[in-house]
Amino acid sequence: MMSRFADAAKVATSKYPKTTNKTIKYGTAGFRSKAEELDFIMYRMGLLAALRACDTKAAIGVMITASHNPVQDNGVKLVDPMGEMLAPAWEVHATTLVNASDDEIPRALEKIGGEARIDLNHSPLVFVGRDTRPSSSQLCDAVISGVRVVGGDVKDLGVITTPIIHYVITCHNDGGTYGVPSEEGYYQKICEAFVKLRSSGASNGNYEPIVYYDGANGVGALMIANFLKHLGNSLSVSIYNDDGVLNHLCGADYVKVQQKWPEGVPRIQNVRCVSVDGDADRVIYSYIDSNDKYHMLDGDKIATLIAGYIQELLKNSGLKLKLGLVQTAYANGASTEYITRKLGVPVACAMTGVKHLHHMALQFDIGVYFEANGHGTVIFSKEARAAIRDAAQRNNENANKLSQVLDVINETVGDAISDMLLVETVLHARGWSIFDWDKAYADLPNRQMKVTVADRTVITTTDAERVCVTPEGLQNSINEMVKAYPQGRSFVRPSGTEDIVRVYAEASSQEQADELAIKVAGAVYDQAGGVGSKPQSL
Ligand SMILES: CC(=O)N[C@H]1[C@@H](OP(=O)(O)O)O[C@H](CO)[C@@H](O)[C@@H]1O
Ligand SMILES: [Mg+2]
């Protein structure tokens, strides 16, 4: 019998033939590689998205972006019905489908359909969005072809940020409860709440409503301009890096990793600079102080600022809701210490990757989660949201504020611009300058290194990646090394996005953190099959 998916193979062969025999895996960030290697993968992800839409009987999202990677790269990730990352079982299906030969596509689709017991009579709807990369438009056409060849409908959102597609998908699938399912609906919801929260005046104490915005030369620069149309005089945003080479010497990843002021932004003392990444789902703040010293405020600083403020609103409102913060092993030790000891907010540690953090944040009524690199948000349980809205209606002033704060937040995924507006809201409420915020606690000096090994899967970990299980003996070596450094901490784990092992070290001085990182990197090289030359310096 001819497969109902026969056309999928025909179009694959004629328009999107497979161009590699390498095995490819759907990773933490979906599929990512050089743009010219991606046509066939995009087409197949269109096919898969349509099947997933049948499976969930809901609209599915496809975002074409390689986030902070160089402009030559591109990538694709699927968004599940409530804005979540694609379910793990479907990551496996994605991998199977991408690794099938062109002729095997119908069989692979039948198999996925069978395993997931999909109702193929459902007519699938797929939303697609893309970043500003020159390759994105053509790759988007490949996705659309994939969806259509199996009878799906497409809504093309055009050039948008990753968080906007997550928001639109969620609103579409919940019948508009979370908000109006459109790009315009997104701006309106967030901005209206933000403007209301500062209706008594945009300045307050040490807070001045002025930011410099580093758009990473990407979609974040376009979208902030749309935000500004809704923000009136509430915040003055000067936009920089809006038409150069994507992510080049600027943007959130550059600022965080290089710990440097972004190129293209005027180097003015004591001004808050907000850097977003290539698809605007990550944000990092930085400033130059009066002594011309550079300071970077990362996801940990953002998370502690937000959690501290929500805790205060909760306390003053009398609402009994359980607030918690989720971090990863990369969170600076000083931030964990500050939030647990000073603020008394419980902290949980999740494995790297936002889906793990998101999942762990669900255990709290209000869960704040952030990776140190600036990706994160706040999520509220249904009950928490209802309790807040209810108390707000009964004129509880703090609950009312919290209710408006809730609308500034994009709960569906980490969102650079919504997170920025949230940070600005807290600073405004507290009357803080960026300096006041920064001095809450001092980061422990830290260092990250990469080690290349023959097979990074020989490294396995436990306890949210903080303890290394294999190769046997490596953790003991790390323990011995760490002992020699005051406030020393170090761990190693295989990257989920690059073919390397990551080493993290922190200690009481930068020299010591660097020294510890180099020693631990050496131990990884010796005990886990290092290749090339042994790491001896940074
Ligand atoms: C140390 C670090 O920043 N790791 C990043 C990086 O993961 P790795 O598994 O470490 O390669 O990419 C992930 C996806 O973008 C992001 O979630 C994560 O935070
Ligand atoms: Mg990103």
Image (cartoon, rainbow, N blue to C red):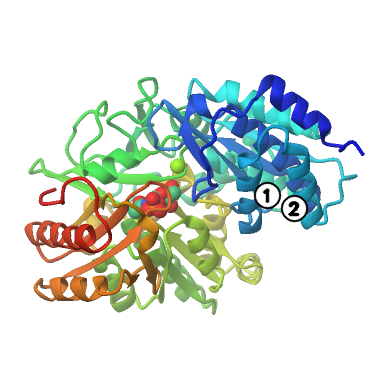
Q: Residue at x 70, y 51 (%)?
A: 81
Q: Tags 1 and 2 in contact by the CB under 8 Å rule?
A: yes
Residue 449 image offset from top left, x and y in percent: 23, 52
x%, y% of residue 526?
19, 61
Q: Is residue 38 visible?
A: yes
Residue at (16, 58) in percent of width and height = 522
Quarter of the figure with residue 236: top left
Horizontal side of residue 355 vs 43, given as left or right: left
* Res 3 label: none
Mark 1, ligand 2, within 8 Å: the answer is: no
Residue 176: image x %, image y %?
74, 48
The disc at residue 170 is 1
Placement of 271 over or under 393, stated as above or below: above
In-image side of 162 versus 463 (left or right): right
Instruction: Examine the rendered structure and indicate whether residue 491 appears above or below residue 200.
Output: below
Circle 2 SS class: loop
The quadrant where residue 183 appears: top right
Residue 446: image location, x then y, percent: 19, 58
How packed mark 2 is, by other alpha carbons closer than 10 Å (few <14, some 14-19, many 20 or more), is some
| Nearer-the-camera pick, 139 or 162 | 139
**Disc 1 marks which amino acid?**
Thr
Q: Is mark 2 within 8 Å of ligand 2?
A: no
Identify residue type, mark 2. Asp
